[in-house]
Amino acid sequence: MHKDIATPMRTKEILDKYGFSFKKSLGQNFLIDTNILNRIVDHAELTDHSGAIEIGPGIGALTEQLAKRAEKVVAFEIDQRLLPILEDTLSPYPNVKVIHSDVLKADVQAVMKQEFEKQEDVMVVANLPYYVTTPILMKLLEERLPIRGIVCMLQKEVGDRISAKPGTKEYGSLSIAVQYYTKAETVMIVPKTVFMPQPNVDSAVIRLTLHDEPPVKLKDEDFFFRVTRSSFAQRRKTILNNLTSQLPDGKQKKESIQAALKQAGVEESRRGETLSIEEFAQLSNALYPYFH
Ligand code: SAM
């Protein structure tokens, strides 16, 4: 039996062997606690017929645990310097494929088609680079990849915003964007001590489970997201004032917005943060004819 990658000693050994220095600009904070990794992987509920996609394998700490539980793992890593290291550390796991690529530029859809022909389900599992967490999550969701869900480590504050409920200060357009596609839960709070180097911020693990059906019926998805973003443009303003200043100019704009609010049963004086996804759906459907 070889030693797990995710221990402080083995990680130091690997970093020393290759003279690797962390790049802060790439969000490189590696996990050095096998116990935490196992708990993260538990939340993904993988079987030996599952596929797993990892973003940013680093030196392979999480990849290794995924390789033990999933049938196949595909990992996207941007940092060229990590490729020879991964080839070495992951050599006991023939079911892992590492792709050298910026995941934001990768054709993940095509990779999935090619690599996960046989797997029954695919989960994304990652300790995300914190500087690009939101763009990565939104890319994965907006591309409507055929995945079951996502389990990922991120900055706790971003996790709080993603899983926030209406009426809280964390609730905003990010909560709505993610909750439109998935059921979002924070499943773990993680101490800084399990990373090398330790990050400056607190971390959490969230689980996103894709909805089978969208939770609301929309006339136009893009317009719905536009309305939600507009409603949060200035958090202290009422929904009427935000929409009036943000939506495109047209004939009797304010009156049209007032009529749509009335039709959707939303009082003009409310703030965006108090509206549920269902209310935003009704509102954007009522506004749609006035702006198209
Ligand atoms: N999975 C490893 C672990 O848990 O120890 C490393 C996680 S570290 C927080 C983030 C990893 O993402 C680093 O290996 C970094 O090089 C990689 N990365 C950063 N930006 C990326 C991008 N745009 N596409 C793919 N990988 C990226």
Image (cartoon, rainbow, N blue to C red):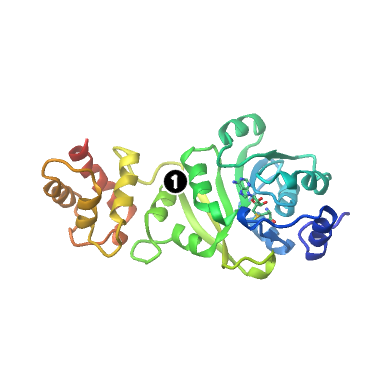
In the figure, residue 284 lies in which quadrant? top left
Say how many tags the image has: 1
Asked if residue 133 lies left or right of residue 67, the reply is left
In the image, is 138 to the left or to the right of 90? left
In-front residue for pair 100/192 = 100
Residue 267: horizontal and vertical position, in percent?
A: 18, 59
Q: Which of these two is toward me, 188 or 81?
A: 81
Q: Is residue 93 above or below residue 169?
A: above
Q: Secondary structure at mark 1?
A: helix
Residue 60 or residue 281, whichever sits in front: 60
Task: Determine whether, in the image, residue 12 is placed left or right of residue 128.
Answer: right
> Is the N terminus in the top left, top right, bottom left or bottom right quadrant?
bottom right
Quadrant in the picture for the C terminus: top left
Q: Is mark 1 within 8 Å of ligand 1?
A: no
Residue at 58% over, 36% down: 106
Amino acid marked by disc 1: Tyr
Quarter-of-image position of residue 50 = top right
The percent position of residue 11, horizontal first and vertical second, equals 79, 60
Q: Which residue is mark 1?
A: 181
Image point 51% across, 48% down: which residue?
Answer: 137
Q: Position of residue 78 (x, y in %)?
A: 65, 44
What crowding class fits label 1: few (fewer than 14 Cα within 10 Å), some (14-19), or many (20 or more)? many
Q: Nearer the viewer, residue 91 or 209?
A: 91
Give the image location of residue 72, x and y in percent. 71, 40
